[in-house]
Image (spheres, rainbow, N blue to C red):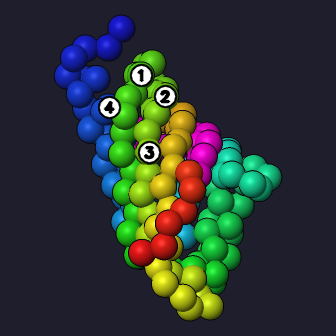
Amino acid sequence: MISPAERDAALAAIAAANQRLDEALMASDPEAAARCFTDDAVLGESGMADVVGRTAIREFLAHANTLRTVTFHRVIRDEIELLGERAIELGRFDETKVKATGGPPVHERGRHVAYWRRDPDGAWRISRIVVSDLPSTSS
């Protein structure tokens, strides 16, 4: 059992990690974004095979940056269950991006389930995330 203070600290640390991920995606910084994931993390996005491992996630994001620029990204936590050194977060995301080929900005939104783990260095990182896109709209 963790104390209320430990719970509050963990929830704040996870919220800060989500914000760092938002900022890294908007800065087109795949290295910073990948640091938000554990070494053995799994990224599952709609319509594609899982991306496994921090290195593969960084490469996936670097390639994605050649296809689009994220101009806005926000993770919204709906609920979270803290389980000691692990947590399960249910939430949503909003994202706006511009394709490298041009055209109007594309707004995407969706849901996610993120499994968080506190690494030995004390940082909370995503160990698995499953993202489910909802229909896109143009801005």
Mark 4–mark 3 CB contact (< 8 Å): no
* Placement of 88 over or under 58, stated as above or below: above
Q: Secondary structure at mark 2?
A: strand
Q: Is residue 62 magenta?
A: no
* Magenta part of the chain: 122-133
Query: In the rendered structure, which amino acid carries the disc numbered 2?
Result: Ile
What residue is pinned by disc 2?
88
Q: CA distance from mark 4 to mark 3?
A: 20 Å
User: Mark number for residue 15?
Assistant: none
Q: Give the amino acid at mark 4.
A: Ala
Q: Amino acid at mark 1?
A: Glu
First reached walking from the N terminus: tag 4 or tag 1: 4
Please provide percent x and percent y for residue 6.
Answer: 26, 23
Give me the C-alpha separation between circle 3 and circle 2.
13 Å
Foreground pick, 118 / 68: 68
Q: Is residue 34 visible?
A: yes
